[in-house]
Amino acid sequence: MGMRSRHQKAFGLRCYPAGHRSVTLLLWSLAALVVVVNFHLLIIHKEEDESMSTHEIRRSIMRELEAVEEEKLKLSPPRSRRNPRAVRRKGERKPPTIVDEFLDESSAVHDMFFPELNMAVDPINGGNDSMYLYYPGRVWLDTDGKPIQAHGGGVLYDKKTKTYFWYGENKDGKTYKTHSKGADRVDIVGVSCYSSKDLWTWKNEGVVLRGEEKNVTHDLHKSNVLERPKVIYNDRTGKYVMWMHIDDANYTKASVGVAVSDSPTGLFTYLYSKRPHDCESRDMTIFKDDDGKAYLIYSSEDNSELHIGPLTDDYLDVTDDMRRFLIAQHREAPALFKHEGTYYMVTSGCTGWAPNTALAHAATSVMGPWETLGNPCVGGNEVFRSTTFFSQSTFVLPVPGLPGSFIFMADRWNPSDLRDSRYVWLPLTIGGVPDEAADYSFMFPLWSRVSIYWHKRWRLPDGWRDS
Ligand code: DGJ
């Protein structure tokens, strides 16, 4: 008994503090658990709040880009340019359309669409109020104060230098025709390159692929045609690869040309030209997909259809694989982009330098089938919308940090003085219901709407790079 009680005591003596400790431990553990759970809930709520506010910020940015701007521009009735005697002899001719007036350098309508140099977008002397403002159609000066020469171009974002490079046709020469029925042209000067960190202030990096002055047999001889250059970077080879439309003055060669460089600012070495897949190729573009595969897209068969095919792994050639699409649709000026796994394309009709109606297309696989969604242009007025705001597509550039937002890049060609052609950059967004949906499944449209919004002036939202 004594033993027991001793033991009990001893036990009790050993056990009591241990029991006390475990209760304390339990209480502390519970308290810690409460703290951890609360902390976790706090983090979740904070993340939710943050993602809500990021979402809200995105929505308000999108609302700003998508604001519909009507164009109140009043166009006076077309003038009759014929003398009454000629009318009596030959009868009344159809009055000129707005597009005719737009193309006619002696018309007031033309002047409205090609504002004078004193209205230029000038990143150096622009002042704070006009910082980062895009004015579609105005002369756009580089950091040397000279008009940017990058027509039919495209933009490459170079991850190595965290810089944007804008490549395009340098058309800084006299406009002339080789014969009365020929197209207005400028001799090949080469491909210009401009660099920028903010997509608004552009520094001239020079002519990175030069036209050829003497050798008449060279593809780049000044008497030929070099149009729509585009550059992509090959991660495997570390080379910058340029593809372009190469032609003779009559557009009968209908080929693509390839050039390569170790640096985005060149010089590029011209490699060769060819007819891809043994087919005619005129207006073209290239597209690099997320998986590093790249594609050539070109107008073919007398511009009646488009072709698409993968490039080789080094991007220096096409493979044998090719699909035809938009057959008999007569589309050109393709600009391809991707959003959330769907491929989109904007194209123009084929009317030389004259503007016409854009169409948006979509596909779930880049090789097609491609479907037509309709005219993506929103705002302005009926004439603006049916003429792609008096311009022609050339490239669609994703806005970093704003998924679903892009910059639609287009050319407002001035065929009477091609060097004075202007740039039309406008916000393009993907989302919402297409108003001319090509295809419905169980009453639901299969595709999101592609919209290009008219703005007389606009800017990318502040902090778009880190939004
Ligand atoms: C329309 C094309 O899109 C331009 O690149 C150019 O080739 C002109 N035609 C020439 O008329």
Image (tube, rainbow, N blue to C red):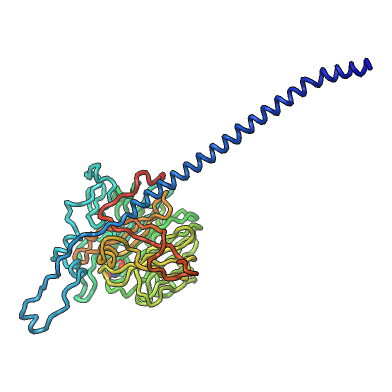
Pick whichever, 416 or 217, lies toward us: 416
> Observer-nearest residue: 18 or 281?
18
For image coordinates 30% across by 55% down, the residue present is 207
Horizontal side of 420 relative to 81 (left or right) equals right
Front residue of 130/429: it is: 429
> Which quarter of the rendered picture does the C terminus lie within?
top left
**x 26%, y 67%: residue:** 355
Point out the quarter of the image occupied by ligand 1.
bottom left
Q: Is 175 placed left or right of 247 in the picture?
A: left
Residue 403, image x and y in percent? Answer: 43, 53
Q: Relative to residue 172, is residue 264 drawn left or right?
A: right
Dividing the picture into quarters, in which one does residue 72 lie?
Answer: bottom left
The front one of 381 and 414 is: 381
Q: Is residue 264 visible?
A: yes
Residue 224, image x, y percentages: 28, 68
Can the viewer see residue 215? no
Residue 389 position by quadrant = bottom left
In the rendered image, the quadrant that contains the N terminus is top right
Q: Is residue 273 above or below residue 456?
A: below
Residue visible at 31% across and 52% down?
194
